[in-house]
Image: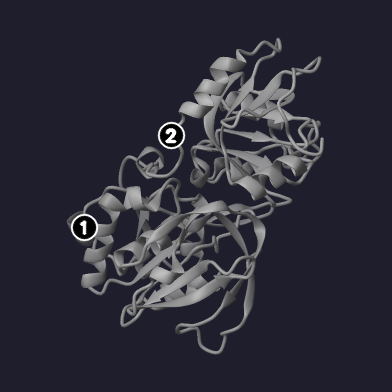
């Protein structure tokens, strides 16, 4: 279809996406039955659908995959980025086929059902992506009914009644419950995940606002000993762990909302000259703690092919270099609000939005993208090496 419009359910339709605008997009449901309200976004990555679905940054969101063949390699226990999926559901073009990969352990549709996540196939995802691009990320309800029976009026009311991500603190819902050490390192084919080597390592306390596991693995790979703490851990409790540096993780929701309890802690760490490294939500809240503002984006950046250019800061002779990065964010740092104490270090080559900052006179920096990838390119691993290397 050229543009999604509301029309009667076609024969055989068992899946439905109801936008708050009243648009109804029909397809074939798979995974769990039921309905869930959230924000519809799109992701342009060609691989890594399991990592996307388990990324806590997608809490409260329904993911439209622009790559048509989702589920074709199945699922496995090694590719989780959290203990369970956090995206509410997904929308795909082609039906989920039987998996064809030696690492497969479970059919994607079965995995979705077992984890309570709803999927819809048979959707013109190009048209839906254009709708999001032109009109912004909409609030919607994704629904699956095996017998094809839907109360469309109730689903529309549910979509229109969902409050949206602005003002929503979701970090508190996806963070871990207690403090613990992280030991797993990088993954190798046929070997699995490495364990951290012994010996003296710089101690990084990582604040979990909804972190991906691969972030902690990359910190270990870069040479750190990692202790992970919940999102609402106090400044005193963090300092009591005697960190050499503190990492601020990615996560879902509005940074200004999470920042109500996180920013005072980050500001306290800055006052004590603690080395800091923030990714995505952590980057945004580092900017808030430095006096900048954040804004809701029109459509967000989500995918594994986003070009970012280094434009300033203490990056040796690398200014002007372009990295291809993995991104997942619907909020951004307002570059026009950056105070004189903050230097912009990276910008998006798609739209010029801020993608990195450094605090003048401090060992504190952040990037909007995901240097741990998973899925995505490994251009940005140097950031973990930069952070950990300065802690020795």
| Side (left or right) of 195 relative to 174 | right
Q: Secondary structure at mark 1?
A: helix
Q: Secondary structure at mark 2?
A: loop
Q: Quadrant of residue 363?
A: bottom left
Callout in the foreground (2, 1):
2
Looking at this view, name the residue that lies furthest to the bottom.
317
Any mark on residue 135, and which?
none
Residue at the image position 36 percent from the left and 59 percent from the top:
285
Q: Quadrant of the C terminus?
A: bottom left
Q: Position of residue 342 (x, y in %)?
A: 37, 76
Q: Position of residue 67 (x, y in %)?
A: 76, 46
Q: Position of residue 174 (x, y in %)?
A: 41, 40
Q: Position of residue 293 (x, y in %)?
A: 37, 62
Q: Judge whether residue 377 can be spotted in this image.
A: yes
Judge whether 274 appears above or below 167 on screen.
below
| Side (left or right) of 129 relative to 57 | right
| Side (left or right) of 94 relative to 319 | right
Q: Nearer the viewer, residue 6 or 342?
A: 6
Q: Judge whether residue 248 can be spotted in this image.
A: no
Judge whether 6 appears above or below 391 on screen.
above
Q: Earlier in the sequence, mark 2 or mark 1?
A: 2
Mark 2 nearby-residue class (10 Å; few <14, some 14–19, many ≥20) = few
Q: Are marks 2 and 1 in contact (CB under 8 Å)?
A: no
Q: Quadrant of the N terminus?
A: top right
Residue at the image position 49 percent from the left and 37 percent from the top:
60
| Real-space CA distance between mark 2 and mark 1, rounded to the nearest whole angstrom | 31 Å
Where does label 2 land, which residue? 163
Where does label 1 land, which residue? 235
Q: Quadrant of residue 155?
A: top right
């Amino acid at each position: 279809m050229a543009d999604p419009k509301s029309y009667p359910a076609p024969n055989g339709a068992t899946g439905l996406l109801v936008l708050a605008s009243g648009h109804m997009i029909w397809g074939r449901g798979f995974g769990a039955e039921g309905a869930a309200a959230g924000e519809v976004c799109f992701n342009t990555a060609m691989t890594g659908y399991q990592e996307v679905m388990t990324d806590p940054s997608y809490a409260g969101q329904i993911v439209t995959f622009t790559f048509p063949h989702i589920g074709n390699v199945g699922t496995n226990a090694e590719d989780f980025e959290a203990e369970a999926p956090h995206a509410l559901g997904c929308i795909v073009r082609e039906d989920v086929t039987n998996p064809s990969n030696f690492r497969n352990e479970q059919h994607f549709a079965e995995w979705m059902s077992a984890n309570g996540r709803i999927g819809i196939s048979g959707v013109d995802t190009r048209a839906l992506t254009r709708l999001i691009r032109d009109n912004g990320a909409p609030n919607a309800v994704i629904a699956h009914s095996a017998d094809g029976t839907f109360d469309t009026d109730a689903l529309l009311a549910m979509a229109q009644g969902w409050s949206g991500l602005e003002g929503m603190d979701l970090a508190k819902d996806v963070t871990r419950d207690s403090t613990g050490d992280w030991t797993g390192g990088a993954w190798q084919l046929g070997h699995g995940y490495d364990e951290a080597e012994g010996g003296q390592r710089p101690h990084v306390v990582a604040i979990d606002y909804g972190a991906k596991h691969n972030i902690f693995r990359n910190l270990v790979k870069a040479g750190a000993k990692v202790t992970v703490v919940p999102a609402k851990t106090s400044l005193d409790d963090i300092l009591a762990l005697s960190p050499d540096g503190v990492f601020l993780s990615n996560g879902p929701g509005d940074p200004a909302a999470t920042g109500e309890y996180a920013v005072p802690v980050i500001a306290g760490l800055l006052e004590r000259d603690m080395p800091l490294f923030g990714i995505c939500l952590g980057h945004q809240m580092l900017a808030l703690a430095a006096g900048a503002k954040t804004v809701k984006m029109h459509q967000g950046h989500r995918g594994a092919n986003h070009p970012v250019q280094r434009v300033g800061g203490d990056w040796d002779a690398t200014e002007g270099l372009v990295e291809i990065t993995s991104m997942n964010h619907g909020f951004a740092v307002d570059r026009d609000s950056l105070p004189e104490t903050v230097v912009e270090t990276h910008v998006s080559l798609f739209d010029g939005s801020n993608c990195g900052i450094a605090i003048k006179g401090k060992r504190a920096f952040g990037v909007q993208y995901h240097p741990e990838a998973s899925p995505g390119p490994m251009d940005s691993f140097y950031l973990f090496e930069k952070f950990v290397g300065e802690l020795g």
